[in-house]
Amino acid sequence: MARNMSDSIENLQALREKVKFGGGMKKQEAIRSSGRGTARDRIRNMLDEGSFVELDTFIKHRNTNHGMFLHQTEGDGVVAGHGTINGRRVYTFVQDFSVHGGSMGEMHALKIAKLMDMAEKAKCPVVAVWDGGGQRAHDGVNALAGTGELLDRFVQASGRLPMISLVLGPVVGVSALAASLADFTILGEEHGQLFLSSPLETPEVMSGEVDAAGLGGANLHASRSGIACMVADDEDDAFFLASELLSFLPDHNDAVPPIEETADPENRLNPKLAEIVPDNPNKPYDMVKVIEEVVDDGYFVELFEQYAENIVIGFARMGGSTIGVIANQPKVLAGCLDIDASIKAARFIRTCDAFNIPLVTFEDVPGFLPGVVQEWGGIIRHGAKLLFAYAEATVPKLTLVTRKAYGGAYLAMSCKHLQSDYNVAWPTAELAVMGAEGAVNIIHRREIAAAPDEEKENVRLKLVDEYKAKFGDPYVAARNGWLDDVIEPEESRIRLIRALSILRNKREWSPPKKHGNIPL
C-alpha cells in the first residue's frame, strides 16, 4: 500500500510538471520571445504570490468522433482557478496560446463556464485573460455548444459580479464577443487585438489596405470602436490597471465598494477652481482639472480616455468612498453631447448603478451636437440612452453645474427632474432652454432688425443681458427648487462630500417589473 501511494504521488507530480509546459517548451519559448507571457507566467505576475489555487487541471479535449485532434493536452488550453490580487479574492482564467493557439474547444469553454458558476456562488470578481484564436474548428459544433454555455454564464453574471477582461494577444470570433461582455476591457498596446471576423478572411486585410493592428488593434478599439476602456503599455501595466479597477469595485452587487483612508481633509476648500474655469462662457477649459481639484488626493482614473473625448468618465474617491464621475469636457466640441458620448456615459452609469457606486456629475453642456451625421446616426435614440440610464439609476446622484446647462442636454445630464438627489450650481452657471445669444436671435429677431444699424449691437447685447437675468440665472432654477443651492466654487468639495455622506444609506423603491426597455 505504501509503495502504491508513493507511486501514485510520483505519478501526480509528473503529471503536474507536464501540465506546466502546456503545449510544450518550444511553443512557450516562442511566446516569450514574442514579448508575451505564457499562461502561467501571467498567473504569477497578476496574483499575489502563492495565492493561486488551480481548478480542473487535468481536463482534456474529448477526442471523440466529433473531434479531429489526434492528441490531447491537460487543461485544454486554459488555466483556471482562484487567488488574490492585493488581498482581494478573485476567480481567474488565462488562455494558453501554446495549446492549439489558445483556441476554444468544447472542454475549454465548459471549464470557463464552470469557473463562472463557482465565482457566482462565492460572490467574487472575475478577471479573464484572453489570448486565443477563437472557436476550435476541429471541434465543430461541439465548440460552439460549449461557447454558448460560457456566454450564458457571462450574461447571467453581468451586474452581479465585477468582470474585467485583459486582452493580451489576438482574440477572434465569438471569444471576442465574450471578452467584450465584461464590465471593463483592457487591451495590451502591442499584442492586444480583437476581431469578430478573422483578419485572414477580411477583404481589406487581404488586399493590403489595412493591417491586423489597424483592423482590431488596441489603439483602434480605444479610439474608434469604444471597446477598450484602457490601453496597457505592457502586461505588467495591464495587471496593474486591473488591480486599480478592482480597488474601486465591490466584490458583488450586494456589497459596498471599498473605503480607502485618505489624509485629504473633507473640509478642504478649492480656491483654484475659480482660476481653472474662465469667466468668458465661450472659452474652453479642461474639466479633468476641475475633477482632480475636488476629489481625494487629486486622483482620478479616467476610462475610455481616447473615445468620445467630449465627455469624461472614470473613478475617484471622495471622503474615502468610491464615486463614478461623469463630466462634460468643454475643450472638446465645447462639451456637446453626441452619439458616442451618450453611449459611453450611459453604459458607465449603469455599471456604477449595478455595483452601488454613487454618481457625481460635473456639468457644462451647451446641448446635443447638431448636424446631419448625428441626426441620421440616431442621436435621438442614443441620447435617450443617457437620459434613461440616469433616470433608472437608484444610487446617490449628485450634479454640479459649473457653467452651461442648456436644453435637452440639461435634462439628460442628471437634472433634478430625473430624481437626482443633490443638484448645485456655481453663481456663474446658466440653466436655460438654450444660450442667451441664440434665444435672443430667435425671440427678438424683429426687434433687432427694426433697430437702426448703429444701435443693433447695443440692442442685442441689452436683450441678451435681460434674457440671462430672467431665464439663465441659476437663482431662477433655485427659486423653483430645481437646484438645491447656489454655491461658491471653493465650496464644491465640502458640499459634495456632505451630500454623499447623508445619502450613504439611500434606498429607492420602484414598481415591480422585469426590466426597463432602454432604447438600444
Image (cartoon, helix red, strand yellow):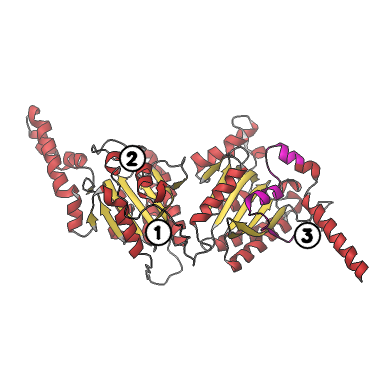
The CA distance from mark 1 to mark 3 is 44 Å
- Amino acid of disc 2: Pro
The residue under label 3 is: 58
User: So how many labels did they put on this image?
Assistant: 3
Residue 44 lies in magenta, yes or no? Answer: yes
| Mark 2: few/some/many CA within 10 Å (<14, 14-19, 20+) | many
Residue 358: give its label. 1
Of the two numbered discs 1 and 3 on the same chain, state the one appearing first in sequence: 3
Residue 242 x %, y %: 56, 50
Residue holding disc 2 = 330
Q: Residues within 10 Å of mark 3 (few under 14, many from 20)?
A: few
The magenta segment is 29-58
Q: Is 249 left, or right, of 108 in this rendering?
A: left
Which numbered disc, 1 or 2, marks the residue that appears first in the sequence?
2
Which quarter of the image is occupied by the C terminus?
bottom left
Q: Does the magenta stretch include residue 465?
A: no
Residue at position x 60%, y 68% in the image: 121
Q: Residue at x 43, y 70 (%)?
A: 513
